[in-house]
Amino acid sequence: MKILVVGGGGREHAIIKKLKENPAVNTVYALPGNGGMSNDAICVDIGAKDIDRIVAFAVEQQVDYAVVAPDDPLVLGCVDALEEKGIPCFGPRANAAIIEGSKVFSKNLMKKYNIPTAAYEVFEDCDAALAYLETAPIPTVIKADGLALGKGVIIAETREDAKQAVISMMRDGQFGKSGSRVVIEEFLTGPEVSVLAFTDGKTVAPMVSSMDHKRAGDNDAGLNTGGMGTVAPNPYYTDDVAAVCMETIFLPTIAAMNAEGRTFKGCLYFGLMLTPNGPKVIEYNCRFGDPETQVVLPLLESDLLTVMQAVTNGTLADTPVVFKKQHACCVIMASNGYPQAYDKGFALHIPAEIADTVYVAGAAIKDGQLVTAGGRVLGATAVAESLPAAIDGAYALVKQIRFDNAYYRKDIGQKALKA
């Protein structure tokens, strides 16, 4: 089988490694991929948002199955375009991907169908938003409506910070068109949980839960990032909590999308807050999370391609989705300075004997040598019988990987251990 995976980060590397476990898979193309995954896939220099070229390549190569992993191509209709050419795909069509593509859409959906979430207001006028902030409860959360590379959410601790966030999004155009509308919402408290779920629009098969570490520094200090590490399962997500989430959030969300004529097929990501008043949705993503995928897929016992095809074919109810009763920890190694300015182009050394457990996100090949080429460079993942052993294993891997300017958090998983 020839498989095409759209995307070029650590998440895509994890998906590719898992797909290759199926003996029927003999060729995997990554568009665009990156230098660090070139041993696992044929990397083709076509950008993830270049839908026309992606489709032309898939047709030319007679690809048997495509996985569209990142948010941008999903929202832009990459799945629609591939399916129109008869290529079966994993991922939602554009009219369903809007659940991530527009925060306003997703908040209004939850309100309409009584899915628990934070109270909120929507603003299209900057002055009106600023006037609202004069009396809004603080802290508050400011969200750009559209996609913003995971950086369009600001938790404002003061009224001044809240106003500045609104001005930078709405007046200064920090996120372009994505910030022309904003959602201002209630600040929720409680443990955060990420749950990815396979769904064919009828059945929901949740994956093992995970805990992300968003802040750049130890003890959750510093700026928000795309994620500095993850552990799975999340100890706060008990069987009882999972049952409540299935009944009040997961199934109602799928039913709501169906009722709106926007059937969702693919991986739906639920960002949850376990508040004193029960679980609430912080955000939806229309795809696998990054770096959650790097701890969730290594724990998947079922064959990933078989599950994905069941999602595409609408037969998920008849397909076992089984996870190992183990623990996983992923530590992200980043370029010092990320998520702001950082240097790149440093030689990257990953010992061959641990390459199977390393997911490369920001690397390129230059003069035959693997070099750093991004903020988040790679994730090192260990699977073990206990969480402490998984954490120790991940840090043992990190110690074997070398590149100048390397930075990583030293406390990934500590919050989970305290739970």
Image (cartoon, helix red, strand yellow):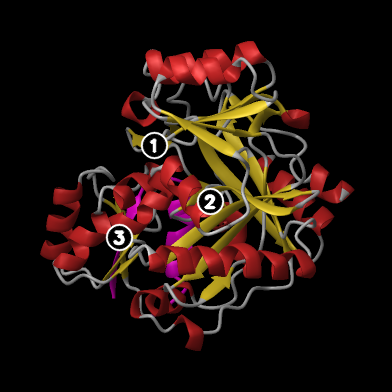
Q: Residues within 10 Å of mark 2 (few under 14, many from 20)?
A: some
- Where residue 101 appears, as percent x and y from the top left, is 38, 45
Residue 140 falls in which quadrant of the image? top right
Distance of label 2 from label 1 (alpha carbons)? 19 Å
Question: Which residue in the protein does label 1 denote?
Answer: 146
* Left or right placement of residue 234 versus residue 379 in this view: right
Please tell me whether mark 2 or mark 1 is closer to you in this view.
2
Range shown magenta: 1-23
Q: Secondary structure at mark 2?
A: helix
Left or right: 28 as drawn, with respect to 61? right
* Identity of the residue drawn at 38% across and 77% down: 309
Q: What amino acid type is highlighted by mark number 1?
A: Gly
Q: CA distance from mark 3 to mark 1?
A: 17 Å
Looking at the rendered structure, the kind of residue marked 3 is Arg
Question: Could you say which disc has been placed on residue 364 in the image?
Answer: none
Secondary element type, mark 1:
loop
Residue topped by disc 3 = 93
Question: Which is more foreground, mark 2 or mark 3?
Answer: 2
| Crowd rating for badge 3 (residues with CA inside 10 Å; few <14, some 14–19, many 20+) | many
Q: Is residue 227 magenta?
A: no
Residue 374 versus residue 113: which sits nearer the camera?
113
Image side of residue 239 versus residue 185, left or right: right
